[in-house]
Image (cartoon, grey):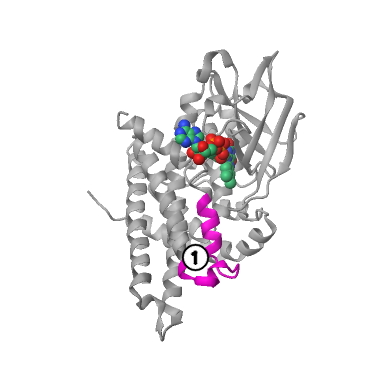
Amino acid sequence: MDFALSEQQRIFREQFRRFCEKEISPLVEDAEETETFPLELFPKMASLGYLCPRYPPTYGGPGIDKITEVVMREELSRVSQGIATSWSAHSHLGTYPIFKWGSEQQKQAFLIPAIRGEKIAAFALTEPDAGSDVRFIRTTARKSGGDYVINGRKIFITNGNICDFLTLVAYTNPSLGYQGISMFIVERGTPGFMVTRKLKKEGVRSSETAELLFEECRIPADYRIGDEGAFFRLMHTLNEGRVGVAGNCVGIAQAAYEAALRYAKSRIQFGHPIGRFQAIQFKLVEMATEIEAARLLVYRAAWMIDQGLEPVKEASMAKLYASEVAVRAAREAVQIHGGYGMMREFPVGRFLRDALVYTVGEGTSEIQKKIIAKEIGL
Ligand SMILES: Cc1cc2nc3c(=O)[nH]c(=O)nc-3n(C[C@H](O)[C@H](O)[C@H](O)COP(=O)(O)OP(=O)(O)OC[C@H]3O[C@@H](n4cnc5c(N)ncnc54)[C@H](O)[C@@H]3O)c2cc1C
């Protein structure tokens, strides 16, 4: 058993932390205020291999392991979970199905430009009446000659209004139940594909989120990703994503903890830094301990992926625990900041708003518990 990152992973963390602090940090305030994703960032990240880091050199990526990716996600979210949200929709959910099951032609047309930062990806599963219950989606892809015709509505789609293409989940054969679910690529500009509204959000404001409508939207049959009947491929995509997102949650919690620790050392009340009071110390100690525990769960699930295993229970445990820890850490960071915690000039309020997104997004805490319950035989 080895609890240490390799030297290469440590160097990667340091380099990427410097990049986040130098290149991303200065963009955050404006992006949050204007609720606009800074589009110039993706090509810059791509030029350094930071945009889609998991994909192999054959397609132009650096091909890093899952542990290094979660380390990277921690660093990105430590600076901005909004930007990390858009990055994640692009670098994993929107492109992974194409990488894993797409044709060579699809990889050339969509995956490689996404890795280069020339095209932005999104992932469209959730619908107004189907969130946790994936099987209840109503979007259909009807075969028509050499094409598929898409009809349906999608909501809460990260990058939905700024993407060049999206990976769309739809029923090709509703009579088969969940086995009739398939995945497709839909390009922006395809007639019948409309962005109906950009959504205003409480958290992850620097990530853009949209509602989409597909009305008789005709796409070529070879834009289907893999065969029809993609439910288990979809679950695999979400499962691997969950481990990544758990890494993001550790990053939010870490940022909240660091801000609270700094503040506790500098804020003087009753003649002492507030960090001298046991009540504040205990909060910080609990934050530090829970973050460490969450990190271990996340690294273990990531390690399992690197071993070629499918960590279902471990992925859900990591996502459940890390997202709840992020909320608790951010909540305590606000409390430790007193009135200043409510002021926008301090980032802790943002950490809390952002953390709250992740006990819901990519599978709610209740759904993680439902998965874990099944995995432990209930
Ligand atoms: C900022 C943001 C970005 C997002 N980006 C994307 C994206 O890019 N692509 C995409 O497809 N989706 C995206 N989503 C959607 C997200 O994945 C869903 O919001 C999430 O899966 C929950 O679905 P829902 O909102 O419909 O809630 P519901 O499923 O309606 O759940 C409502 C409540 O009921 C609980 N609940 C539901 N079923 C059960 C049950 N069986 N047992 C116990 N409790 C239950 C839930 O836990 C929750 O507390 C995004 C969401 C947000 C907030």
What residue lies at 35% left-to-right and 33% top-to-bottom?
373
Residue 156 picture location, percent across and down: 62, 41
Disc 1 crowd rating (10 Å Cα; few below 14, some 14-19, many 20+) is many
Residue 237 seen anywhere in this rendered image of the structure: no
Residue 205 seen anywhere in this rendered image of the structure: yes
In this view, the residue in front, 355 or 107, is 355
Prevailing secondary structure class for the magenta stretch in the rendered image:
helix
> Which residue is the extreme one toward the right?
191
Q: Which residue lies under the disc numbered 1?
A: 334
What residue lies at 61% left-to-right and 36% top-to-bottom?
110
What residue lies at 32% left-to-right and 53% top-to-bottom?
293
Query: Considering the numbered disc 1 on the image, is that residue within a helix, a strand or a loop?
Result: helix
Residue 139 on the magenta segment: no
Horizontal relation, residue 95 to residue 285: left or right: right
Question: Which span of residues is magenta-colored?
Answer: 334-356
Amino acid type, mark 1: Val
> Which residue is the extreme one toward the left?
1
Q: Is residue 278 above or below residue 141?
A: below
In this view, the residue in front, 179 or 222, is 179
Q: Which quarter holds ligand 1?
A: top right
Residue 353 on the magenta segment: yes
In this view, the residue in front, 17 or 181, is 181
What residue lies at 47% left-to-right and 60% top-to-bottom?
331
